[in-house]
Amino acid sequence: MTQIFLRNLGWITAILTMTTLGLLLAARIPLRYNLRNLRVRWIPTTLTALAFTAVIGLLTVMLAFVSGMVRLTQMTGHPGNVLILDESANDEAFSNIPATDVGDLVNLPGLVREGGRPWVSMETYLVVNQLLPYARAGRPNRRFLQMRGVEDVQMASLVHELPLHPGGRWFSSAGVREIVGPNGKTITAIEAVLGEGIAREMAQDRSPEELAQALSPDTLLPGDIFFLGDRTWLVCGLLQSAGTTFDSEVWAKRSLVASIFGKNTYTTVVARTPNASTARQLCEYINTQYKKAAIRAQPEKEYFASLQETNQQLLVAISFVTVILAVGGIFGVMNTMFAAVSQRTADIGVLRLLGFSRWQILGSFLLESLLIALVGGVLGCALGSLSHGWTATSIVSSGQGGGKFVVLRLVVDAGTLAAGMTLALAMGAIGGLAPAWRATRLRPLEALT
Amino acid sequence: MKLFLLVLKNIRRNLLRSILTGLGTMVLVVVVIMVWSILWYLDEQTREKTSNIKAIVTERWQMPSRMPLSYAPELCAGSARRPEHVRPQDSMTWQFYVGSTEPGRLSRESALFIVATQPEKVLTMFDELDTLPPDSPDRRQLEKAIQALKTNRQALIVGRERLEAINKRVGERVKVYGMSFKRIDLEFDIVGTFPEGRWNNLSVMNWEYLNAAVDAYNRQPGNRPHPMTERSLAIVWLKVPDTRSFTAVATQIAASPSFTNPQVKVETLASGTAAFLEAFRDLIWGMRYFLMPAAVVTLCLVIANAISLSVRERRKEFAVLKVLGFRPAHILGLVLGEAMVLGVVSGLLSAAGVFMVINFVFGGLKFPIGFFGTFYIPVRAIWWGLAVGSATALIGSLVPAWIACRVRVAEIFARVG
């Protein structure tokens, strides 16, 4: 239902706008008359418009959250990339490809090559526990951290098209570096590259030792350290990963990740082909003809698009709540408009005697209700738009287990605003219809007596 | 009493407005109660208990947790090696067998998430099943299914929603193709379901069946040991009487030399749940501090609007009442009373209605968040409805009531003249 509504949002908005304009033209009763009445009865007008503002503002923020999640899954992945998991895994976290099976994948046909080197990134993705002894008050004392062990970080960067922010560097081939630790002793730290989002998130629960060496109180920066898995880690770069699910990942040398966290198999192989069509051909080849390993391939874009289940569930929940709130708003505007009709019985009688038809009376009252809705809707959209760009944490998943923790930015786009205005106008139209209908049923002479 | 009768009379006088305001209040209270119920349940699940504590032992660093099954006996004993060591009151192990009813394809309609555990622990260790009343039909039905699970190793208890999704019924046989235990496919006899609620999407099998299947796979000529052989244990649950015992058991396990590769961690169920819900932190924050206030504000505005319309229309009446000897406090009470009666009645009706409809018609509120899929409206929500209805009515009607009690008799009658 929600999907049908959103798919036809343009049509619905157009029909409601046309109805409003049609009423304006057909009612023939001057718009000034309605505006004056709204001004005279400014208290109920304001209260009703404010109720609309609250409902539409809420809807805008909630839809902005979902839009942020949708954009995140849509922006992640390259059309030419093929994601290879083990044959039964539907999520990177559950995939296990033995080391013996990945070696031959560099020989797959149709891969992009540079200097004879195929663009293939071999990775181990896993979710690890980071203990947080210095977690902020009221927060759990551990967090799930998404770790990606990559065999060749520069190749991974090419395949995923994720460059570093200026000032950072990729980790060395050893993956470790000697640094002076918090207590002045030289220690061996594991080098890591962080997504921007997770760098901000991890900066919130740092120990006094980490903070003492911190370069910024708000985010981890190259040169900062953090503790994970009984080891000290050194941030050597931040990925330009905003707006993708990689924004919430920590990348490090695969062999180190495997030994520290005890996952020795690969989970993911990402291979670059020239374009979406060759990617699909390669998937077809792997899934039907490649027999050397028990693996399954799908275009990377499709994999991330499949992580929309959470978005769908949220959208359904939001629609449900919004419809209930909207019904509340409709009762509010009905009250206002019924009161307007009963207060202006004499006006209606005069208008009827002057020759205005029942339909014109109906149009005039409906227009008044739509005007309240319009003002409330615009204010609600404006208020909700303030949430554009806010960051939030959430999870995206295919609904079959697994999923990814993500840091997303709320997006208020044209679709969100159109949905807000459509709902506002629909509330105004539904709420105003019954009172306007009652106004048309008044007999002119009886109305004047 | 007379004032109260007058309040009721006034509510009846503009019945349409009263009904619309009441309906508006009711639908908005529905939103508040539903959101509140979800938040209350999540708060309850993440609130640290001081007695009857459930602890979970999992792999220290990796998620999903995968430990050797050989860890199970010592972990179930809380690593109590000396007489003075504290032993858990009860324990159970969980191994996860994820499979599909269709070969090689895991979909919403085919997926089965099965916990392999000790059958007798389902009624003593599973959250909410351990508190089923002894004589309840749900418990009797579950006891029967557990008995079948003990006697028939191929028995399977399936949650109601899952059973419906895979299009099977109790008494039928189902073949499950292993996804987490690849190449280990199992056949099951569905012997029962869980009571409606928390475990709607989970299935439970006898752990002996899974481990025998793994052993059989390893014994087959030409097979290398199954990759899950040494990492099939996901969670060990322990029940301890109080915080002191929990700390002692956690210390014993942490000090044990048996759990080094991989290392393990012990935490309370509440703490583990809180960590899982951390991913939904902002969503929960939004529900608590954004959605709820917005619903309450909308409700206040709808009530304020209705009452202010009423006050505006009845200014002459208030002036007459004042002439008849009513004091401003009486008029204030009259207007507030009208709003409060509407708010209380609508709030109560709404709460009772949402309690009945959500719990008994829809079988709970479906809102997947973490591993919670269905939420129920608690009985206490009826009081929340009353409180929200009356509080918003009071707040919404304060200003109109104040305006009503300050009506100047001379001004009103001058206009009439």
Image: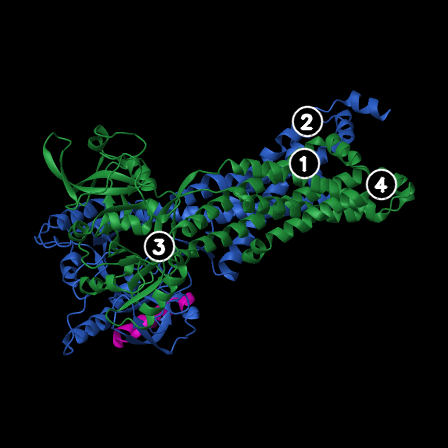
Amino acid tagged 4: Ile
Marks 4/2: CA–CA distance: 29 Å
**Kind of element beneath mark 3:** loop
Q: Residue at x 14, y 62 (%)?
A: B70
- Colour of chain B, in one word, is blue
Residue B340 visible, this orientation: no
**Kind of element beneath mark 4:** helix
Residue annotated with mark 3: A403
Question: Crowding near pointer 4: few (<14 within 10 Å), some, many (20+)?
Answer: many
Subunit bearing disc 3: A
- Relative depth, front residue between A418 and A154: A154
Marks 1/4: CA–CA distance: 25 Å
Subunit bearing disc 1: B
Residue annotated with mark 2: B403
Indicate whether A57 appears above or below B365.
Answer: above
- Colour of chain A, in one word, is green
Magenta extent? B141-162
Tell me the mark number nearer the camera, choosing from 3 and 4: 3
Which of pointers 2 and 1 lies earlier in the amino acid sequence? 1
Question: Crowding near pointer 1: few (<14 within 10 Å), some, many (20+)?
Answer: many
Amino acid tagged 3: Gly
Which of pointers 3 and 4 lies earlier in the amino acid sequence? 4
